[in-house]
Image (cartoon, grey):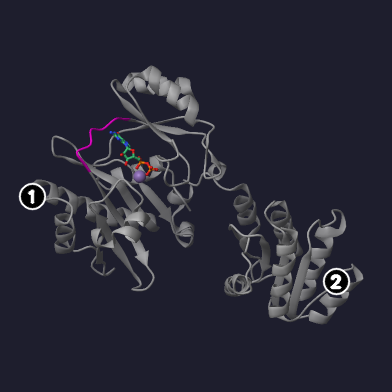
């Protein structure tokens, strides 16, 4: 689950990190009022779950309250990476002497959190990692002890020379790690962490991604979810218990089990196609889930063919078949569908599908190849 910048800032602030005050607003008039109250120059920042807002025109410096209103008028309602901006954060403009990057992520390879810093902050950290990896410094964190003082200090020396700033940055890193732990985050980053002309170190931007598995035991964090800011299809999927993630390809996939879903996407790519989504209907086979899944897939205009890949264990193939038949009973599918099912109640499922005019395959390679071919022909 993604947090908005203003929510992430509040968590960092609660952990003791210096973060400038800010106010959220939803209309240009409100932005003007906030800017007036703050006095002086402000920055108006789009609150959407997307990075690179600056480059997309979603972060604007305004010298006056009137200018802030003009910027807000443009930013509110604009789209950034397909998401509509409905709130902005207004903060007093900071004077920047230097910009660096500080972040903590879970590193799956070492199975530990890793604190990463770079003196090349402000820009995309992925770009720094790709072009100048020698400018990224990291420390692996033993979860039993947390980020140790000497680790924080040596990372801070990669950012600053002034002992005062090194000390501040080291403290901020330890606070960031604490905030990361407390929130159940999989990522917490400050980009940019700036120095001001008077020498203090301040967090200007904040990004926190929460590990969804942590939400159940963290009600206060779960309440921060903003469904209006999420992809409507992903919201709908979550409500019925489907795991759905939109991707860039054109083969719509509907699979039971996350592992099989991954294997299916691999196979789609292996045969030269691109999956349009990851979709796991889960272990049970409630026909209602299948209906919702099919609705979500068919609503996506980039889907050119639909691939069902079901391995019946606890999931019963006949339940899935009934779901497909019910979902397509009233609205005819406009795109080719390839159905592969095997396992529990397979033969019943095949009968149900045949009666409704569908073909059913049992071989996974064959099914994937067909779906890829049909998507290519339709594209
Ligand atoms: P992002 O593009 O979504 O990461 O948004 P950021 O909040 O990181 O802002 C992008 C860039 O805008 C920063 O790296 C800064 O260079 C600039 N910026 C943001 N806030 C301020 C500010 O208060 N003062 C100044 N001078 N620049 C700012
Ligand atoms: Mn940023």
In the drawing, what numbered circle is on residue 163?
A: 1
Crowd class of label 1 (few under 14; some 14 to 19; many from 20; radius 10 Å): few
Q: Is residue 33 visible?
A: no
Instruction: Residue 68 in the image: state x and y as whole percent.
Output: 39, 23
Q: Is residue 255 visible?
A: yes
Instruction: Residue 56 in the image: state x and y as whole percent.
Output: 45, 39
- Of residues 81 and 311, the one nearer the viewer is 81
Instruction: Residue 352 in the image: state x and y as whole percent.
Output: 87, 72
- Which corner quadrant of the figure contains ligand 2? top left
**Where is residue 154, by image quadrant?**
bottom left
Crowd class of label 2 (few under 14; some 14 to 19; many from 20; radius 10 Å): many
**Dot placed on the residue nearer the N-terminal end, 1 or 2:** 1
- Of residues 333 and 222, the one nearer the viewer is 333
Q: Residue at 70% of width from left, 51% of height from top?
A: 301
- Of residues 150 and 302, the one nearer the viewer is 302
> Magenta residues?
92-98
* Image position of 269 (left or right of 373): left
For the residues marked 1 and 2, what is the alpha-carbon distance in whole angstroms?
72 Å
Q: Residue at 71% of width from left, 51% of height from top?
A: 299
For residue 111: magenta?
A: no
The response on whether ligand 1 sits within 8 Å of label 2 is: no
Label 2 sits on a secondary structure element that is helix
Q: Main secondary structure of the magenta part?
A: loop
In the drawing, what numbered circle is on residue 353?
A: 2
Q: Residue at 43% of width from left, 43% of height from top?
A: 4
- Whether 64 is drawn above or below 163: the answer is above
* Image position of 29 (left or right of 366): left
Instruction: Residue 1 in the image: state x and y as whole percent.
Output: 48, 53
**Where is residue 372, by image quadrant?**
bottom right
* Image position of 374 (left or right of 103): right
């Amino acid at each position: 689950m993604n947090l908005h910048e203003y929510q992430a800032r509040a968590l960092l602030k609660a952990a003791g990190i210096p973060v400038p005050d800010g106010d959220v607003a939803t209309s240009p008039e409100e932005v003007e009022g906030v800017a007036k109250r703050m006095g002086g120059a402000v920055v108006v920042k789009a609150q959407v779950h997307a990075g690179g807002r600056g480059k997309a025109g979603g972060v604007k410096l305004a010298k006056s309250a009137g200018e802030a209103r003009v910027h807000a008028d443009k930013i509110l309602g604009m789209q950034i990476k397909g998401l509509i901006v409905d709130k902005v954060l207004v903060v007093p403009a900071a004077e920047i002497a230097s910009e660096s990057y500080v972040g903590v992520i879970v590193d799956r390879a070492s199975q530990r959190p890793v604190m990463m810093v770079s003196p090349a902050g402000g820009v995309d950290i992925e770009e720094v990692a790709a072009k100048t990896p020698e400018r990224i410094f990291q420390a692996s964190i033993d979860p039993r002890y947390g980020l140790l003082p000497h680790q924080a200090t040596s990372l801070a020396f990669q950012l600053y020379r002034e002992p005062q700033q090194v000390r501040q940055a080291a403290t901020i890193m330890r606070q960031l790690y604490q905030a990361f732990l407390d929130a159940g985050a999989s990522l917490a980053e400050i980009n940019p962490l700036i120095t001001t002309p008077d020498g203090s170190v301040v967090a200007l931007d904040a990004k926190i991604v929460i590990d969804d598995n942590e939400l159940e035991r963290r009600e206060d964090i779960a309440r921060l979810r903003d469904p209006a800011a999420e992809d409507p299809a992903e919201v709908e999927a979550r409500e019925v218990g489907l795991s759905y993630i939109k991707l860039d390809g054109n083969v719509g996939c509907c699979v039971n089990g996350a592992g099989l879903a991954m294997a299916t996407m691999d196979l789609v790519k292996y045969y030269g196609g691109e999956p349009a989504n990851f979709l796991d209907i889960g272990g049970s086979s409630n026909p209602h889930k299948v209906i919702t899944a099919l609705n979500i897939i068919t609503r996506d205009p980039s889907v050119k063919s639909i691939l069902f890949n079901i391995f019946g264990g606890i999931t019963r193939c006949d339940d899935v078949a009934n779901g497909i038949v019910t979902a397509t009973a009233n609205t005819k599918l406009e795109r080719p569908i390839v159905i592969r099912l095997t396992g529990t109640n397979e033969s019943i499922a095949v009968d149900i599908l045949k009666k409704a005019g569908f073909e059913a395959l049992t071989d996974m390679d064959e099914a994937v190849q067909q779906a890829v071919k049909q998507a290519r022909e339709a594209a």
